[in-house]
Structure formats: structure tokens, C-alpha cells
Amino acid sequence: MGEQPDLGAAERPGRAESAGLIYHIARADDWARAEAASRYAGSALCRADGFIHFSSPHQVAGTLGRFFAGADGLVLLAAEAAALGDGLKWERAPDGAIYPHYYGVLAVGRLRMLGPITRDGAGGHVIPVALGDAADPAGEGP
């Protein structure tokens, strides 16, 4: 992860995707610390990887399933992709898909907390807002 391949035009995010919301799943305690400090550097995994992991709308459910299975105490954050400037890179992950990664620390005002991610009776996650294809558990993401 973190490699920045030269993506061909066909692999770059479309104008609508790059100008829309991207999402980050955070542990509630990490977000509370960020709010107190007015800055967010990501989770321990993000800091180890050197960037804040984001997901496009159709990748959120897959990210939850792959990296947060069984986890409680999560919140969903959103950011306007276009507002993140040059720190935002769309990069290919080991699974071959392209994900948004933010290199740097974000002022908490650049992120919007959309709500807690709860669990349903079957142990699955419930996303606090409608994200279109993000409700599809077949999506994947880091």
C-alpha cells in the first residue's frame, strides 16, 4: 500500500467521484481525541501506512467487513474529496481496486461525523446514512 502508480486515464476517478464525498471509518475514541486536539491523523493503521484510509461510497461496506468485522465503537466520517487538495491520492491497493488516501493530518473541520456505525441483530454493521452502493456487502476496501 502507499505506492503511487501512474494511473491511466481510464483508471482515474471520474469527475463526479473525485468531487463527491469520501468516507473514513474511525474508532469513536480516536475521533474523540481528534476533536479534542482539533486535528486527525487517522487510526494506528493509517499512521503506520503513512496516510489516512478513505473509501468511496461503494467501498464502505467492504471496508467494514474486511477491516472491522465484529468491531464496536465505530463512527463514519466524510470529507469532500475536491476540498482535500494535493494531499488526496487515488491509489491502487493490493486487491487491485483504487482507493482514496490522504497524506497528511486533517483539521477536524475538514471532516464531518455522520454518526455511529451500529450493529444489527446478526452482528453486521449498520451504516448511519444511505451511501448508495456502500450498503452492498460485496464492496471491498481498506
Image: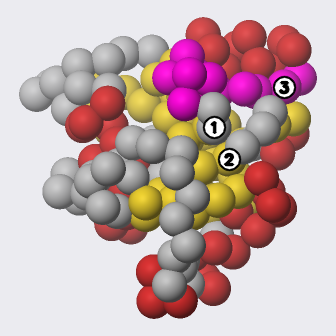
**Dot 2 and dot 3 residues touching (CB under 8 Å):** no
Q: Can you give x and y, in whole percent of width and height, for residue 23 in the image?
A: 55, 49
The residue segment tinted magenta is 38-49
Residue at 80% from the left image edge and 20% from the top image edge: 35
Question: For residue 71, what is the image quadrant?
Answer: top left
Q: Can you give x and y, in whole percent of width and height, for residue 91 in the image?
A: 51, 60
The answer for how far apart the CA atoms under marks 1 and 3 are is 14 Å
- Residue 69: which numbered mark, if any? none
Q: Residue furthest left?
A: 122
Q: Is residue 57 magenta?
A: no
The answer for how far apart the CA atoms under marks 1 and 2 are is 5 Å
Residue beneath disc 2: 102
Residue beneath disc 3: 39
Question: For residue 44, what is the image quadrant?
Answer: top right
Image side of residue 71 versus residue 3, left or right? left
Residue at 87% from the left image edge and 14% from the top image edge: 37
Mark 1 vs mark 2: which is more N-terminal?
1
Image side of residue 38 versus residue 50, left or right? right
**Dot 1 and dot 2 residues touching (CB under 8 Å):** yes
Q: Amino acid at mark 1?
A: Phe
Q: Is residue 82 above or below residue 93?
A: below
The answer for how far apart the CA atoms under marks 2 and 3 are is 14 Å
Under circle 3, the secondary element is strand
Q: Residue furthest bottom?
A: 10
Q: Can you give x and y, in whole percent of width and height, for residue 4 in the image?
A: 57, 58
Residue at 20% from the left image edge and 32% from the top image edge: 124
Q: Amino acid at mark 2?
A: Tyr
Q: Is residue 17 above or below residue 64?
A: below
Under circle 2, the secondary element is strand
Mark 1 vs mark 3: which is more N-terminal?
3
- Residue 51: which numbered mark, if any? 1
Q: Is residue 45 magenta?
A: yes
